[in-house]
Image (cartoon, rainbow, N blue to C red):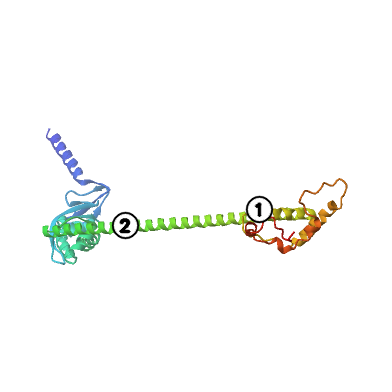
Amino acid sequence: MIIGIVVVVVVLGLLVGLGMSVKIVREYQRLVLFRLGRATGTKGPGLVLVNPVTDRTSLVDLREQFLEIPHQTAITKDNAPISIDFIIFYKVVDPQMSVLTVQNFAGAALNVASTTLRSVVGDMALDDVLSKREDMNASLRVRLDDVTERWGMKVTSVEVREVNPPPGVQEAMTRQMSAERTRRAAVTEAEGQKAAAITRAEGDRQAAITLAEGSKQASILSAEGERQAAVLRAQGYTSGLEVIVQVARDLDDKTMLLQYLDTLKQIGSSPSSKFVVPMELSGLLNGVKGLLAPAATGGTGAAPAPPGARDASQVGSFPAPALVRDTASDHGGEPGAAPDGS
């Protein structure tokens, strides 16, 4: 009975000791081992056996972590107080150093971040703090990384979340923003009017060019039409003259004499008080005399001369200037008077 109890106690002790001697370390963890108070290095990942009597362990997480820094008040280079809060992202790069060199990394990082923030903001103006957050983030990361490097930590990123200037500055910023928007609106409106004026001028120019080209084409077409019409008229005149010349070649002297007589008849019937007889009248009369001579000699079948008709010799005896006369003498002279006094 006593032996059974002793066996049970020994087995339980072995199980408890075995449980304390076996450690399972995950992939993202490392085990810092202390044997009799002295650091002997890091273990893991995987199964790690330790002596529960002489060994002590400290587990370190290697994953990237973040630390929120609450609102910190800082004064800018132009003496404007602002409140800033930001986040620090870090990871452990040396598990043994992170355990041996710093007791509370979160508290240490918070205090270092506060002093570093005041130093960085003090070198920047308020406008730069509000507009150049990327530069401020990079400066904070570099300065914090210089301090945390000796702790076996690596600051991977710093992100400023909120910057709160004092109320007076916020009101001035609001007025400035309103004025800036008003200025941009005026500039945009002026640019729009300028673009519209340029577009209208361009349209007027294109319209004027199109109108001028149309007028030019119309003038060209009109001139071309007039030229073609003149050419056609000239061709018509030429054809008419050619026909007249062709017909005139076939005319004899008798036909021309008859034309002369018809012309004289038209001149005599004119209502004018004066008329002019051509100088070739004597030649015309000689031609008429030649035509009338066969009839006067009594050819067979000749028709008798009408009463009051003059002999061809008498017609030929007219002086040419006597036929060029003033018709007024017909009204004021003696009726029936002949030019030759007969």
Looking at the picture, tell me which residue is in the foreground, 15 or 62. Answer: 62
Judge whether 144 appears above or below 6 on screen.
below
Determine the residue positioned at 37% across, 58% down: 198
Q: Amino acid at mark 1?
A: Ser
Q: Judge from the rendering whether residue 73 lies leftward or rightward of residue 21; answer left or right.
A: left
- Looking at the rendered image, the quarter that the N terminus falls into is top left
Which amino acid, mark 2? Gln
Report the mark closest to the observer, 2 or 1.
1
Residue that mark 2 sits on: 193
Nearer to me, 106 or 21: 106
State left or right for residue 323 relative to residue 82.
right
Question: Badge 2 local density, few (<14 within 10 Å), some, or many (20+)?
Answer: few
Residue at the (78%, 54%) spot, across then down: 310
Mark yes or no: residue 251 visible: no
C-alpha span from label 2 to label 1: 82 Å
Classify residue 323 as left or right of residue 109.
right
The residue wearing badge 1 is: 269
Would residue 304 be visible to someone looking at this image? yes
Q: Secondary structure at mark 1?
A: loop
Point out the tag, 2 or 1, that comes first from the N-terminus: 2
Q: Residue 264: horizontal and vertical position, in percent? A: 70, 55
Farthest residue toward the right? 300
Q: Label 2's element?
A: helix
Residue 209 percent across, percent down from the top left:
46, 58
Q: In front here: 174 or 243?
A: 243
Residue 3: image location, x then y, percent: 14, 35
- Residue 211 screen position, x and y as percent: 46, 55
Quarter of the view holding residue 116: bottom left
